[in-house]
Image (spheres, grey):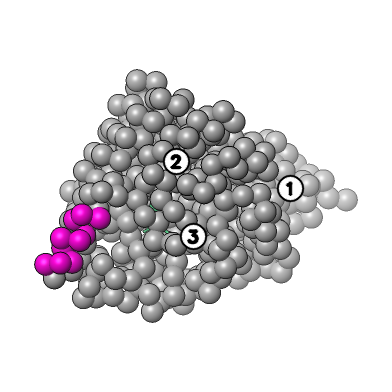
């Protein structure tokens, strides 16, 4: 009789601490042994010789749009895309789905749908909007990972921007329950004003769009957020910082004792304004892509350990909403990228800039797990959940639309050559994805 459900043999096991050759034994969805040569047998055994065995990664920032806007993505296609990219846990944003996740009732709907449809582990952000002050405690008690607010308009009618009063009151409530507020930090005053001026003058190029959302607008909003964090004691998390200049402001506050963390996204590390000019709406997002010098500086921040985590901010939309090429103020702002985060980190990070593989685990495993309190996720060790991605980091491929599992097969990464083929993805001990196909549940 087999001792274990599954043994992965002879892989290069990547943790946040080391890369070592060895075996991993799995039973009842948990990692029960890690060693250089495990005796005993598995019902299933995988030979990972020559391959790297990562803990399944955690994407802290996706929009799957279900319920209510499932035609933009959906939990099944979204979660399959993650699994195909080596990600085994995600945090779904409260907006772009309708109704948004701003009370228990709507959270329950999302939980139920995800239990039915997700092929990886779902987690949920709750929203902070002017209308749901007083409901944050109930969301917290029902298991949201944290809260999300926008300091600038969200682009979605049923998810209003948090004005200063909402931030102040909401952050007091969130501090009281000990949770964390994630914030889209851009100055609404600045962005609105600059966009209005540009549009009035008929200036609607990619560069004009980028100039209407400058880095200073992020810095101004982050500084204001820090003031509220200091006043309320609320833990905060800045999502999608597009520049090292933003990261620097956050690290200054950290040094003063503010409990603040920062995420950047793969697209700010792999794409520039030139991509926006060449690829049109496919590469449109907010904050916008920056120039190459900013990308290089942001990599410096990542390599220095100044960025806490890296996410996709997968915010998909139908292709027809992403085809803008003349007026960049039109069309959906949001990048389809959930499947490619590990590829970007391997290609642009590990191979081009010597980002250690262990750091990839820190950024998309141990840090998110620690900051958001996911027990037993994000690393490989005895007692951890058996979420695993087996990857050939040396295999390169050119990404094609057909490779994508998104409902709408587009991405600004299409056409780029990446390192890192995900061979097998395991979720809670079960193989869900193998050699390009999904196994039935
Ligand atoms: N609503 C929404 O998904 N917005 C996201 N898209 C984007 O590019 N930035 C965002 O915050
Ligand atoms: Zn955002
Ligand atoms: Zn987002």
- Location of the C terminus by quadrant is bottom right
CA neighbours of label 1 inside 10 A, class few (<14), some (14 to 19), many (20+): some
Q: In the rendered picture of this protein, how many numbered marks are placed on residues?
A: 3
Q: Are marks 2 and 1 in contact (CB under 8 Å)?
A: no
Between the residue at mark 2 and the residue at mark 1, the CA separation in whole angstroms equals: 42 Å
Circle 1 SS class? loop
Residue positioned most to the top: 256
Residue 320 in view (yes/no): yes
Circle 2 SS class? helix
Q: Earlier in the sequence, mark 2 or mark 3?
A: 3
Q: Which mark is residue 29?
A: 1
Which secondary structure dominates the residues rendered in magenta? helix
Q: Is residue 94 left or right of residue 32?
A: left
Q: Is residue 270 left or right of residue 103?
A: left
Q: Is residue 181 left or right of residue 9?
A: left
Name the residue nearer the viewer: 3 or 312: 312
Residue drawn 57% across the image and 61% down it: 99
Name the residue nearer the viewer: 388 or 192: 192
Q: Which mark is residue 166?
A: 2
Give the magenta range: 192-201
Q: x, y percentage for residue 250? A: 33, 33
Residue drawn 57% across the image and 53% down it: 101
Between the residue at mark 1 and the residue at mark 3, the CA separation in whole angstroms equals: 39 Å
Between the residue at mark 2 and the residue at mark 3, the CA separation in whole angstroms equals: 16 Å
Residue positioned most to the left: 201
**Front tag of 1 and 3:** 3
Q: Which residue is mark 3?
A: 158
Q: Earlier in the sequence, mark 2 or mark 1?
A: 1
């Amino acid at each position: 009789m087999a001792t274990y459900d599954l043994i992965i043999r002879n892989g290069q096991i990547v943790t946040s601490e080391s890369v070592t050759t060895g075996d991993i034994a799995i039973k009842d969805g948990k990692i029960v042994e890690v060693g250089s040569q495990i005796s005993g047998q598995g019902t299933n055994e995988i030979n990972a010789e020559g391959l790297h065995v990562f803990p399944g990664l955690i994407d802290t920032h996706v929009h799957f749009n279900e319920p209510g806007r499932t035609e933009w993505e959906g939990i099944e296609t979204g979660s399959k895309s993650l699994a195909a990219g080596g990600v085994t846990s995600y945090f779904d944003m409260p907006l772009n789905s309708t109704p948004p996740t701003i009370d228990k009732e709507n959270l329950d709907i999302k939980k139920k749908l995800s239990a039915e449809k997700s092929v990886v582990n779902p987690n949920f952000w709750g929203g902070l909007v002017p209308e749901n002050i007083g409901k944050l405690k109930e969301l917290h008690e029902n298991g949201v990972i944290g809260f999300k607010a926008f300091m600038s308009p969200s682009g979605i009618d049923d998810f209003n921007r948090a004005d200063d009063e909402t931030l102040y009151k909401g952050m007091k409530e969130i501090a009281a329950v000990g949770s964390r507020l994630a914030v889209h930090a851009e100055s609404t005053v600045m962005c609105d004003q600059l966009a209005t001026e540009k549009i009035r003058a008929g200036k609607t190029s990619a560069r004009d769009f980028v100039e209407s959302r400058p880095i200073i607008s992020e810095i101004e909003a982050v500084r204001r957020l820090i003031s509220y964090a200091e006043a309320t004691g609320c833990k905060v998390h800045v999502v999608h910082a597009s520049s090292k200049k933003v990261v620097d402001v956050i690290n200054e506050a950290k040094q003063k004792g503010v409990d603040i963390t920062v995420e950047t996204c793969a697209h700010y590390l792999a794409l520039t304004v030139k991509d926006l000019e060449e690829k049109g709406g496919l590469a449109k997002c907010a904050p916008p892509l920056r120039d190459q010098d900013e990308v290089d500086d942001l990599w410096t921040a990542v390599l220095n350990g100044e960025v806490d985590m890296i996410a996709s901010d997968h915010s998909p939309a139908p292709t027809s909403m992403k085809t803008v090429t003349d007026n960049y103020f039109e069309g959906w702002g949001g990048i389809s990228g959930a499947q490619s985060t590990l590829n970007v980190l391997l290609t642009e990070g590990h191979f081009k800039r010597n980002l250690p593989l262990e750091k990839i685990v820190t950024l998309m495993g141990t840090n998110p797990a620690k900051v958001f309190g996911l027990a037993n996720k994000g690393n490989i060790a005895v007692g951890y959940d058996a979420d695993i991605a087996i990857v050939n980091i040396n295999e390169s491929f050119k990404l094609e639309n057909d490779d994508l599992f998104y409902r709408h097969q587009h991405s600004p990464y299409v056409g780029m050559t990446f390192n890192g083929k995900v061979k097998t993805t395991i979720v809670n001990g079960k193989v869900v994805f193998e050699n390009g196909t999904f196994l039935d549940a």
